Image (tube, rainbow, N blue to C red):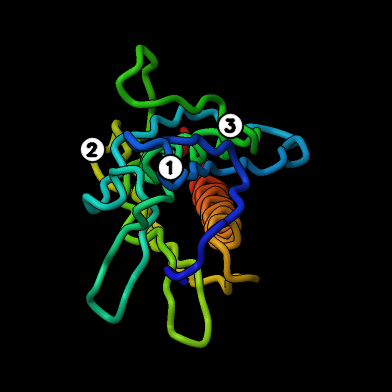
């Protein structure tokens, strides 16, 4: 996978030239947000605050990451995310929860908004995995929810999935990672929905 050149991004490409004027262009990629779901018939009377999402150092930076072998991690020299994956994941989680219409309010922790529950988690993997004869897009993350009134963690959910990449270009890897992340965040939203359905807010 790392031998391919002339790759086509699905987002805006920025051209940086070296001092001789003939350097290779650096390609930038971003994630596309999912289409808004059908409106929910009712929202749970809760305010969710999305807190910190931890991540390895490689996912707190901009270069696209690939896995080489069971223990090797590398980054592409000419292919970058528009924003670090951990930051994009946080933004997409907030938008996914808001768009579901199932919660009274969803905000970022640290803002002036107050909330009943705090969501926080960790993005462990968001990378290309090349096994030689196939390429996959790996997303591995976990989240937990802290009940501020009960002073305890009341919910947690893990997501780990490798999605086959349909093609051999970086753009194909980005598309697979994008789709995989959307699936994971939708699964988290569904799990939260199930939790509040089984544990109606305001009832002991």
Which residue position is annotated with label 1? Answer: 22
Residue 111: image quadrant is top left
Give the CA distance from mark 1 to mark 3.
45 Å
Element under disc 3: helix
Q: Is residue 86 above or below residue 142?
A: above
User: Would you name the residue on which mark 2 appears?
Assistant: 151
Label 1, residues with CA under 10 Å away: few <14, some 14-19, many ≥20: few
Name which residue lies at 27% across and 67% down: 73
Tell me if I can see residue 187 in this picture. no
Instruction: Give whichever of discs 1 and 3 has the lower sequence position.
Output: 1
Mark closer to the observer (2, 3):
3
Asked if marks 2 and 1 touch (Cβ < 8 Å), the reply is: no
Instruction: For the residues labelled 1 and 3, say whether their Cβ atoms are less than 8 Å apart.
Output: no
**Quadrant location, the C terminus:** top left
Residue matched to label 3: 98
User: Dot 3: few (<14), some (14–19), or many (≥20) neighbours within 10 Å?
Assistant: some
> Which type of secondary structure does the marked residue at label 2 adopt?
loop
Residue 194: x and y in percent read: 55, 53
The residue at the far bottom in this view is 133
Between 162 and 99, the one nearer to me in the picture: 162
Q: Quick check: 137 left or right of 124?
A: right
Please tell me whether mark 2 or mark 1 is closer to you in this view.
1
Q: Are marks 2 and 3 in contact (CB under 8 Å)?
A: no
In what element is the residue under mark 1? loop
Is 50 displayed left or right of 152 in the figure?
right
Where is residue 19 shown, x and y percent of the image? 32, 34
Camera-nearest label, 1 or 3: 1
């Amino acid at each position: 996978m790392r031998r391919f050149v002339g790759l086509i991004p699905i987002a805006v490409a920025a051209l940086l030239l070296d001092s001789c004027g003939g350097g290779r262009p650096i390609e930038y990629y971003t994630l596309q947000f999912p289409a808004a779901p059908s409106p929910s018939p009712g929202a749970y009377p809760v305010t969710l605050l999305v807190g910190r999402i931890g991540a390895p150092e490689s996912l707190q930076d901009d270069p696209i990451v690939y896995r080489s072998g069971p223990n090797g991690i590398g980054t592409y020299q000419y292919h970058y995310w528009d924003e670090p994956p951990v930051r994009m994941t946080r933004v997409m989680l907030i938008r996914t929860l808001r768009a579901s219409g199932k919660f009274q309010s969803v905000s970022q922790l640290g803002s002036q908004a107050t909330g009943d529950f705090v969501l926080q988690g960790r993005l462990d993997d968001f990378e290309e995995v090349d096994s030689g004869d196939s390429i996959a897009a790996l997303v591995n993350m976990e989240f937990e929810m802290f009940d501020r009134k009960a002073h305890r963690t009341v919910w947690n959910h893990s997501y780990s999935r490798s999605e086959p990449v349909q093609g051999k270009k970086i753009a194909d890897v980005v598309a697979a990672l994008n789709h995989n992340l959307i699936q994971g965040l939708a699964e988290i939203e569904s799990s939260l929905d199930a939790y509040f359905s089984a544990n109606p807010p305001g009832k002991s």
